[in-house]
Image: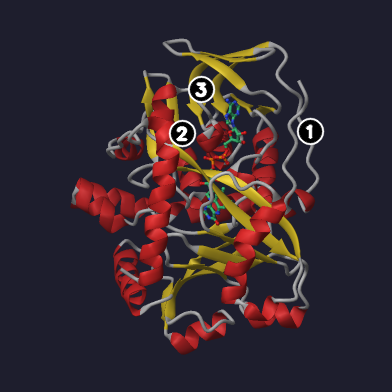
Amino acid sequence: MANIAYPPSYYAASANPAPARPALREDTEADVCVVGAGYTGLSSALFLLEQGFSVVVLEAARVGFGASGRNGGQIVNSYSRDIDVIERSVGQQQARLFGEMAFEGGRIIRERVARYNIDCDLKDGGVFAALSAKQMGHLEAQQRLWERYGNKRLELLDQRRIREVAGTDQYVGGLLDMSGGHIHPLNLALGEAAAVESLGGRIFEQSGVTRIDRGANPVVHTAQGKVRAKFVIVAGNAYLGNLIPELAAKSMPCGTQVIATEPLSSDLAASLLPQDYCVEDCNYLLDYYRLSADKRLIFGGGVVYGARDPANIESIIRPKLLKVFPQLKQVKIDYAWTGNFLLTLSRLPQVGRLGDTVYYSQGCSGHGVTYTHLAGKIIAEALRGQAERFDAFAGLPHYPFPGGRALGAPLTALAAWYYSLRDKFGV
Ligand SMILES: Cc1cc2nc3c(=O)[nH]c(=O)nc-3n(C[C@H](O)[C@H](O)[C@H](O)COP(=O)(O)OP(=O)(O)OC[C@H]3O[C@@H](n4cnc5c(N)ncnc54)[C@H](O)[C@@H]3O)c2cc1C
């Protein structure tokens, strides 16, 4: 079978050198077999190795081939639904656990970068930008909520202040979170993979898992080999397909697109984002952007089903970019790519066990850079017998998409359209 390469993107073009790992061609054993080398799989592997477990990671394509190597690179705290929504569904006491965990993923990333010397252009500072007074009201409430859960690195920005951090007249204000920030996402994944191997973990690429025999002694099969393990962690997220039908039923892969401009002059780049913070607006179908280390504007937005061709992607995203920064009219787009995140109906992560030995975490629904790093930690805790935090997530209710994936995609497209109207008319 032909090897699966990274799809063309700015990240693939600017990736740090990394070895092409071999495919699994043997029968082997480990304490833990991880399916998928995105942030969820790599973070789990790293925490487990640090605690003395032996780990094999099986990746269908390349390290960071999925969302982890294609995303906007924004370190956004909390979850795709905020803690107040969780408070309403699980009660105050349980919600406190979620609140305490909401800012941990960003700390884990920074700790990983420092400990393993990962070169991924890490920058501090992320801005939530309000397009209306109503959205500004939500940000004020978010500040109070996040401060209550311990994030004291927040600053509300009025219209004058936000103009100082984002060179556009689009916004009425914003919220700056200095514990947010941005990274080169593929280089973070590649650095974490190198860290996994430095601790003795084995990673096999081009090794799609075709079957998992569940039970007391699970066996994970690929086309040319198998891994016997005490535990299996399923971390295939939106790229898992139907390997585990009960997980597929409660989640929906969604395509979302990103473009990268040609490198901008230092003056132009500094006029767009003078402090080099990343920005996301407060719409449901949000626009988000930041500068790369070589001063390209990386801009993503919207959810489009099936848009793959770069020209098509540029035609979707460029108008959004020009709405925010009309001054970039003459700027060339060098790269356009698409990636899949996994949506759940509640927009909260889906976490749990299949029997006693197979664990999973998936479905962060758009904001996953921080949560996936936390996921690795709570899975490792659970495998060590400390499952309180894992079980808090596992206890969140999840419902199947009506009609399953076949009907769910059009329904989700309809929901996206509905939310785009809400964004447009501010209702
Ligand atoms: C375009 C885009 C922009 C985004 N921007 C942001 C952002 O700026 N900030 C933010 O917080 N979040 C963002 N996200 C979401 C975030 O990237 C994801 O939530 C996160 O990366 C998911 O990580 P993961 O490890 O769970 O999944 P993935 O990174 O998708 O990794 C899953 C891996 O499993 C592998 N796999 C699947 N099936 C198998 C199998 N059967 N056998 C072996 N391997 C398998 C895949 O090949 C893949 O490498 C974005 C997502 C996309 C798509």
10 Å crowding of disc 1: few (<14), some (14-19), many (20+): few
The N terminus: image quadrant: top right
Q: Nearer the viewer, mark 3 or mark 1?
A: 3
- SS class of the residue under badge 2? helix
Q: Nearer the viewer, residue 404 or 248?
A: 404
Q: Is 353 rendered above or below residue 297? A: above
Q: Which residue is mark 2?
A: 380
Q: Nearer the viewer, residue 342 or 90?
A: 342
Residue type of the residue flagged with mark 1:
Ala
Residue located 50% across and 24% down the image: 242
10 Å crowding of disc 3: few (<14), some (14-19), many (20+): some
Q: Nearer the viewer, mark 3 or mark 2?
A: 3
The residues bearing labels 3 and 2 have C-alpha atoms spaced at a distance of 23 Å
Residue located 33% across and 35% down the image: 402
- SS class of the residue under badge 1? loop
Q: Which residue is mark 3?
A: 243
Q: Dividing the picture into quarters, in which one does residue 352 lie? A: top left
- Asked if labels 1 and 2 touch by Cβ distance under 8 angstroms, the answer is no
Tell me residue 184's x, y (percent).
66, 56
Mark identifier at residue 266? none
Left or right: residue 338 compared with residue 84: right
Q: Which residue is mark 1?
A: 20
